[in-house]
Image (cartoon, helix red, strand yellow):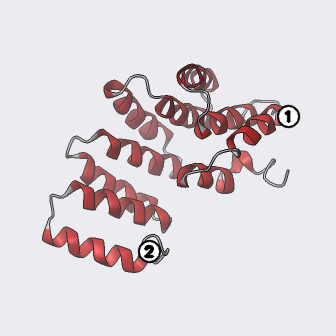
Amino acid sequence: HYNLKQYEEALKIINELIQLEPTNAGFHNQKGFVLSKMKKHQAAVQAFSQAAKSGEISYNFNRAWSYVKLKDYPKAIADYDTCLNVVQNLAKLYAYRGFAYTKAKQLEKAKADLEKAASLEIKDNFVYLGWAAYYLAQPQPQKDKALEYLKKALKFKLNDPEREALEEDELFASVRKT
């Protein structure tokens, strides 16, 4: 049902599975994904939080994106910090945290994270999207540089958070039609 975008039905099934296995972190994680698709980000945070109790770090990463969607950037950054304490050299983690720093208007920290991400792996969609957001968030937005990075990002298949950022985030509104 999830792949068919039948999220209400998918949520019913996941809730039934959780009733059968309440401690199954994977079920709570899937519930978080479904709730995110339904734009119920606060409920998604709760589901990802339940999953994160298992100690699996990827659930913190998933919860962090829900915090970004809720504009609770300090909590998103804290979750990305937790992930980076476990996995130090993953470009995507630095890129996502850099995006959260950009949204929080902490542009120096954003730049440092995006530089670190680029040093680890330059050909990552979210590294490119992070740089585009960074340039658009400047006091005097640098639209030409942002477009340069967006073109690079669009050469690759975007995952759900990348597509959401591009389609929905207000930072990208000025370049969406370009």
Q: Is residue 177 left or right of residue 86?
A: right
Q: How many marks?
A: 2
Above-or-below relation of 13 to 119:
below
Residue 82: quadrant of the picture = top left
Mark identifier at residue 88: none
Q: Look at the numbered disc 2 and give the secondary structure of its residue.
A: helix
Q: Position of residue 58 (x, y in %)?
A: 34, 43
Q: Look at the numbered disc 1 and give the secondary structure of its residue.
A: helix
Q: Amino acid at mark 1?
A: Asp
Please name the residue shown 59% across and 24% down the image.
118
- The residues tagged by marks 1 and 2 sit, at their Cα atoms, a distance apart of 38 Å
Crowding near pointer 1: few (<14 within 10 Å), some, many (20+)?
A: few
Residue tagged 2: 7
Q: Nearer the viewer, residue 15 or 26?
A: 26
Q: Position of residue 83 (x, y in %)?
A: 36, 32
Q: Quadrant of the N terminus?
A: bottom left
Crowding near pointer 2: few (<14 within 10 Å), some, many (20+)?
A: some
Q: Is residue 47 left or right of residue 158?
A: left
Please name the residue shown 45% across and 28% down the image.
90
Residue 113: quadrant of the picture = top right
Q: Position of residue 3 (x, y in %)?
A: 46, 70
Residue 155: quadrant of the picture = top right
Please name the residue shown 60% across and 50% down the image.
158
Q: Is residue 81 left or right of residue 100?
A: left
Mark identifier at residue 144: 1
Please name the residue shown 85% across and 34% down the image.
144
Q: Is residue 70 left or right of residue 176?
A: left
Q: Nearer the viewer, residue 21 or 46?
A: 21
Q: Amino acid at mark 2?
A: Tyr
Chain-order first, disc 1 or disc 2: 2
